[in-house]
Image (spheres, coloured by chain):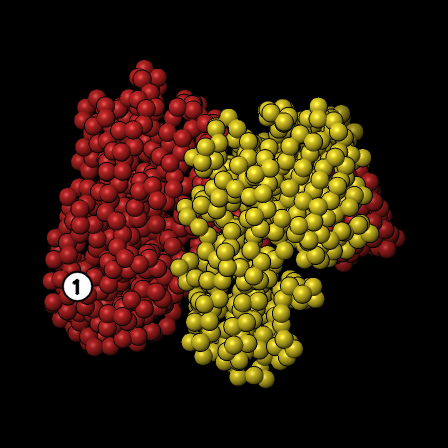
Chain colours: A red, B yellow
Amino acid sequence: MNTNEKLLIIPLGGLGEIGKNMTVFRYGDDIIVIDSGLAFPEEDMLGIDLVIPDMTYLIENKDKIKAVVLTHGHEDHIGSLFYLLRQVDVPVYGSPLTLGLVEGRLKEYDVSDRRLIPVAPGDSIKLGQFEVGFIRVNHSISDALAISLKTPIGTIVHTGDFKIDQTPVDGKMIDIHKFAELGNQGVLVLLSDSTNAERAGYTKSERTVSEVLDEYFASTKGRIILTTFASNVSRLQQAINSAITYGRKVALLGRSMVTVVNKAAELGYMDIPEGVLIGVEEINRYPDNQILILTTGSQGEPMAALSRLASKNHRSLELTPGDTVLIAATPIPGNERSVGRTIDALMRLGVNVVYERGSGIHVSGHGSQEELKLILNLTRPRYLIPVHGEHRMLKQHGRLANEIGIPKENVFIGENGHVFEFTAETGRFAGKVASGKIFVDGLGVGDVGNIVIRDRRQLSQDGVLIVVVTLDKAKGCILDGPDIVSRGFVYVRDSDALIDEARNIVKGVLERFENQPITEWAPLKSGIREALTKYLFSKTGRRPMILPIIMDL
Amino acid sequence: MNTNEKLLIIPLGGLGEIGKNMTVFRYGDDIIVIDSGLAFPEEDMLGIDLVIPDMTYLIENKDKIKAVVLTHGHEDHIGSLFYLLRQVDVPVYGSPLTLGLVEGRLKEYDVSDRRLIPVAPGDSIKLGQFEVGFIRVNHSISDALAISLKTPIGTIVHTGDFKIDQTPVDGKMIDIHKFAELGNQGVLVLLSDSTNAERAGYTKSERTVSEVLDEYFASTKGRIILTTFASNVSRLQQAINSAITYGRKVALLGRSMVTVVNKAAELGYMDIPEGVLIGVEEINRYPDNQILILTTGSQGEPMAALSRLASKNHRSLELTPGDTVLIAATPIPGNERSVGRTIDALMRLGVNVVYERGSGIHVSGHGSQEELKLILNLTRPRYLIPVHGEHRMLKQHGRLANEIGIPKENVFIGENGHVFEFTAETGRFAGKVASGKIFVDGLGVGDVGNIVIRDRRQLSQDGVLIVVVTLDKAKGCILDGPDIVSRGFVYVRDSDALIDEARNIVKGVLERFENQPITEWAPLKSGIREALTKYLFSKTGRRPMILPIIMDL
């Protein structure tokens, strides 16, 4: 055993942001990766489908990677695994539901031959010099795990996403005894979920949703349409339980709802008695008060089933004024407007919509301040690295740690790519590795960067105006054109005068270059660009992208 | 007096949306317009600067308009006045601060010769068959008014934006006696602010902010930077009062902050003793604990002063770890992410940031449910038209009215453009007029519509690819090209092979048309478009806008 080695902890995602969680642990020549998630693009990342972490460090050190260990099956923890596994062939450890959800994704991306190894809470596996332990936690998806990593110089605990649910729906409470035991043995570094570090108190138990749902089911006469994240298996189970109690059949709407419920039922994470599920096409065979529809779209996603229902655009179902929609989710920051629009559209149909925060049909999957402090007190780590959160949440988590007695210098508020180096006694910031946001756009990973995005931004604001002219290169005279084509700039049919004058301005520029052989196009093109930019801005207050194209014969 | 006339109420903005408030009141041949506001563009309105109401109805009836009456000086109530006044020359009534703010805007738009007539609470003016009364209300800007319109068949009350502040900072409480008096005399229709119809209880008094500010000023050692809406004159006054109490000089940052404070002080709405205000360049002459900076940027607007400070991009000021930033505002829906980013950036500079909802340095300017019910109970209207709010807020306001005894059939939940027709005894929905969102983009008003926006959307997602080829029209052969230019699609330097192959595909299409005189370009162009779309999607998963341009000689 080499206890002179240093332990490096390198978060590649999830710090200073919500999403694309990924952390690298290196001891000597052994690397363990915890989670490989994605983030959804922000509004200024035009045309981007997904955002994944920069994995340069892992690819450069691919021979050292012993395994990827997954905490749970949410996209922000598993969604970039396909990309990592394309380049490195390493085993993936996770709980059965997590791996079940991973499997589907890997098939889509043609890397389905990788080894997926199921583990259970309490398991312990030796991977290089790491002894990896799996600890049950509660979260808004079943089968979530925290990870312990024992190394020769000390133990690391990574909570993953968690809450402390003392009355969980599936009866499987977070293993607080294990956290206590690890604390007694000594924890060198704790990495802990900061998502709700700004929220005082305790997060409510998922079970409290059950009672609220039962009340709605008891008092509602028409059809009930419930939307939540498809991966929230416990929430779906509770809705199905209420449906059974009150004699309703259950139909599933939306691709991910169907996928997750089938996978969860197949693996035994949901208990759905025979005859409860019906097809969407069967809904009309039952009276309204015998129907529950579980649907995607809780974030107001324009293409999801609920949005289609709200805009009367769904191919097989139409909502009517007797229906009640229960929105069992809160908008993720950035989605408030789209969720609001969906609610308004539903209400315009005369549908009854239950959506208020206070309605009790949603609780968070992340622990609040008292829970974060409890995990800190149970594990008593020497060092804390707050993870999973915007910078202000990490800072708030750090303050909580200070309050329970961890000194400021032992809390590391980091950025993605920071390297934290530990010995058995010390911890320090030790430089940086490559990090950042890699854009996935269509089939391309990383080929769209700042230049392309900058162009898209200009195009999105004022459109494009293309000037084409065919010149006789030798004589410098115009053979054809200038022709002007624009898109996204002005409504072309109403803009003849503007475009005619623009054409004259281009001719004026060309005259300056006439009757001489043209050796370089650049001055001509920039002359056209400048003259047009000035003219168009004076007339319209807009700055379209101007593209002069010169053909020569 | 003709009491056989019908009263028409036509909201042209503000229903089913936040912003661009505007309501038309017509009795016989007399029209009064209350407010003429703008809305800020939603995220899918690419390149749009402002959104204003469709005013076709007013322009068609311009000779009947007696006046525009303004409730207060916020942009969502005055921001489209310039456009209305460009086409109709009618007087504008409002309180002095409101008109002071209007004046500046009209100058920008070259309609500064219109008659602006100041009124005071309690005033009453005869305009055609309308007797217009002005009633003081409380709001997050000084000098806000509700409007009463007496007609031969009954009285209308329009609250404007309001809250009931029983301890207002300027000592001028909403005139609840006037509302009571109108209620006693009989109100036919009430139009009332629905912004906070979803919030239970009472909105806190602006004065409560004072005490909280004093606490921060007492305990803060470094510079204090406070941001709020520039138009919230009372909030700014309180901050300045705290600064005076604790011996701090006050500097103003951001164009609108300077404009509003100067205008408000000039008109006597703010009391700033000599020697308190200093220039930004003087800040460094004072110790940190003697400085208060009031700045714009409370919504995380990227170009506002606070965002520039956060990104170390401000030309004359730099923040340091000893500074404290107080964010005395909550994010407007849609701005959560940009506000979050600003807070995170400030924290990364080591600045102390106070921003939590619970911090008490912000209260809403709109009345909550108890206040809405109180106005309903005071005015006892026969009919209610909830205004100013998303559809769900209007509905919630309607439910409150039902609770206090107004029957459902007497509450009109409308849409912009709906015509509500009243007699002394009856009210009904009576058709629609033109309505909608008119886009302002640069200098153009209404010239950018769905086609231009749709093109911008496509350009923003996957960019543009232009194919230019010069043909001999008679022989059908290629003289030059095809040349391919793309922007916002792929990173051009890394895409030689892709573009080369695209060029070959275009040549292939052209060959099909070779050696024959070309009479029509359309089949050739659509052939190029289809072949390229298919090829590019198969290689990149993207669908750029493809623009074939053919030059012929």
Find disc 1 in the rendering and name its residue.
Answer: A378
Residue in the foreground of this view, choosing between B512 and A386: A386
Q: Secondary structure at mark 1?
A: helix
Give the position of the N terminus of chain B as an image quadrant.
top right
Locate residue A350: give its quadrant.
top left
Number of numbered discs overlaid on the protein picture = 1
When the figure is inspected, residue A511 is found, relative to residue B33, above or below; the finding is: below
Chain identifier of the residue bearing label 1 in the image: A
Horizontal arrangement in the rendering, residue A341 relative to residue A289 (left or right): right
Q: Position of residue B113 (x, y in %)?
A: 82, 52
Horizontal arrangement in the rendering, residue A515 relative to residue B29 (left or right): right
Horizontal arrangement in the rendering, residue A44 relative to residue B442 (left or right): left
Q: Position of residue A55 (x, y in %)?
A: 37, 57
Horizontal arrangement in the rendering, residue B313 relative to residue A483 (left or right): left
Say if residue B499 shows up in the picture: no
**Residue shown at 58%/74% (left/top)?**
B250
Within 10 Å of the Cα at label 1, are there few (<14), some (14-19), or many (20+) other Cα atoms? some
Query: What's the amino acid at mark 1?
Result: Leu
**Residue shown at 51%/26% (left/top)?**
B409
Give the position of the C terminus of chain B as an image quadrant.
top right
**Residue shown at 19%/68% (left/top)?**
A380
**Residue shown at 24%/58% (left/top)?**
A371
When the figure is inspected, residue B115 is found, relative to residue B482, above or below; the finding is: below
| Residue furthest to the top | A285
Q: Position of residue A164 (x, y in %)?
A: 21, 53
Say if residue A226 shows up in the picture: yes
Q: Position of residue A265 (x, y in %)?
A: 21, 33
When the figure is inspected, residue B126 is found, relative to residue A71, above or below; the finding is: above
